[in-house]
Image (cartoon, rainbow, N blue to C red):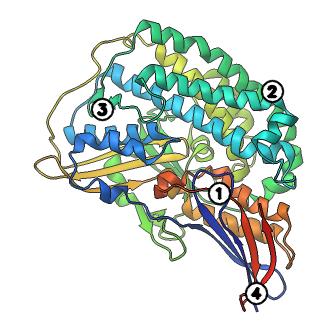
Amino acid sequence: MTQTILIDPVTRIEGHAKITIHLNDAGEVEDAHFHVTQVRGFEKFVEGRPFHEMPALMSRICGICPVSHLIASAKACDALLAVSIPPAAANLRRILNLAQIAQSHALSFFYLSAPDLLLGMDADPAQRNLFGIAQTAPQLARDGVRLRQMGQQIIELLSGKRIHPGWVVPGGVNQALTEEKRDAILAVLSEGIGIVQRTMLWFRGILKQYESEIQAFSALHTLFMGLVGPDGTLEMYDGRVRIADANKYIIADGLAPEDLNTTIGEAVEPWSYLKSPYYKPLGYPSGMYRVGPLARLNIVRSCGTPHADEELGFFRTLDHHSSFHYHYARLIEILYCFEKINQLLHTPTILSEHVRAFAAPNNHEGIGVSEAPRGTLMHHYIIDDDGLIVRANLVIATGHNNMAMDRSVYQVARRYVRGAELQEGMLNRVEAVIRTFDPCLSCSTHAVGQMPLHVQLVAPDGSVVDEIKR
């Protein structure tokens, strides 16, 4: 006789999902799954629309990371136009994307995961939240708010809006950067770097408290995928796709966007509306891979900025398999984002007025690839002779991680969940491994929802054995 534990919905993630944990007669975990429970619709919504509307439309997929979709969509449209955008426009897009990644990483680390890290996995859920952080460590809470504010201010200075900006367009951007705005952005970068470095010192100090979780979250061995620059450095906007195996040996490199159709497959499982991408040469499910901060830092030669590279040295002493270290990787990437923005703002052409290339469609197919906060993001469009969208396919960063999240839930549940009596801490750890990936389910499913927690242990006859509500 088996029993099922239902966590519906998973809390402190962006979007709505649930987890089921199946126990055998001995009270041991027999299986577990991560379910994404909404249907994505944007790929159908945009059919028949003019291709040049895609960046503005696609940014509406998510209010947390609209810039990520704006960038990938615009790059797909650049490919339809078959243009090379002006250098200043490319660098301005880079800065916008870096600011987006910094503010989104701050949201994930300080708002969603820090309650577990500061207060403990077994803490009272009534306190294990941002308000509990504000009471226990006010400076940590202020730092999280300030980092998000900085990232959003940079987005606003560049594009005129913090959410759903229309500044990035096919062929470039629609307005040049002014000297005044450049100086305003430069003025906040050193403060941001200081906040991240202070947070890293704190985080290093608590790692020993989470040795059990680090080991439990390390049971998953996957491939890693992300963009790298021509010299193998961290690249968030352009570059080529690199794939490494579980031991970080490179197995595919220099993949262009058009190569990804033959490299990445998408499987469908009955327990989730979210597809499970995989590396085709290894097949499904052996081709499971991870994307995002952990994957990016596992495949690069260096970050390419001094402070981030210094932290990368420490990161490489950690267990590179453990999804727990997504947290530290996020902090390194925030540091990198502020340093890289500073470098880009000092490039000679950054104030150039030449920021857009104009053309009519020259290709019927275009693929745009960039790095979003949660990993590699792909937009693939096919248009007709009139420039109208015939087909759109989006492979979202959270989607790339779907199979890894599903198997992580199973492995962590096997480690912690025992018997018929529910304990808050054991179930929170199952949720916590999902939080390490920072899934953006509004991006992957394009749905909205609220996230109270309701967990039931249900016997095969439908009777409720135990129950937790919050």
Q: Position of residue 304 (x, y in %)?
A: 56, 26
Residue position marked by numbered label 4 in the rendering: 463
Residue position marked by numbered label 3 in the rendering: 169
**Which numbered disc flags the more N-terminal residue, 4 or 2?**
2
Residue position marked by numbered label 2 in the rendering: 139
* Tag 3–tag 2 contact (CB < 8 Å): no
Residue position marked by numbered label 1 in the rendering: 451
* Tag 4–tag 2 contact (CB < 8 Å): no
Q: Nearer the viewer, residue 131 or 24?
A: 131
Q: Nearer the viewer, residue 412 or 165?
A: 165
Foreground tag (3 vs 2) = 2
User: What is the number of the mark on residue 34?
Assistant: none
The residue at the far left in this view is 385
**Which numbered disc flags the more N-terminal residue, 4 or 3?**
3
**Which numbered disc flags the more N-terminal residue, 3 or 2?**
2
How far is disc 4 from disc 2 in space, using C-alphas?
A: 46 Å
Residue visible at 84% across and 71% down?
Answer: 422
**Which numbered disc flags the more N-terminal residue, 4 or 1?**
1
Look at label 4 and name its amino acid. Ser
How far is disc 4 from disc 3 in space, using C-alphas?
A: 56 Å
Q: Give the vertical position of 299 relative to 2 (above or below).
A: above
**Which numbered disc flags the more N-terminal residue, 2 or 1?**
2
Residue visible at 65% across and 35% down?
Answer: 106
Label 3's element? strand
Look at label 2 and name its amino acid. Gln
How many other residues sit within 10 Å of disc 4, few (<14), some (14-19) or many (≥20)? few
Look at label 1 and name its amino acid. Met
Label 2's element? helix
Q: Position of residue 89 (x, y in %)?
A: 34, 23
Foreground tag (4 vs 2) = 4
How far is disc 2 from disc 1 in space, using C-alphas?
A: 27 Å
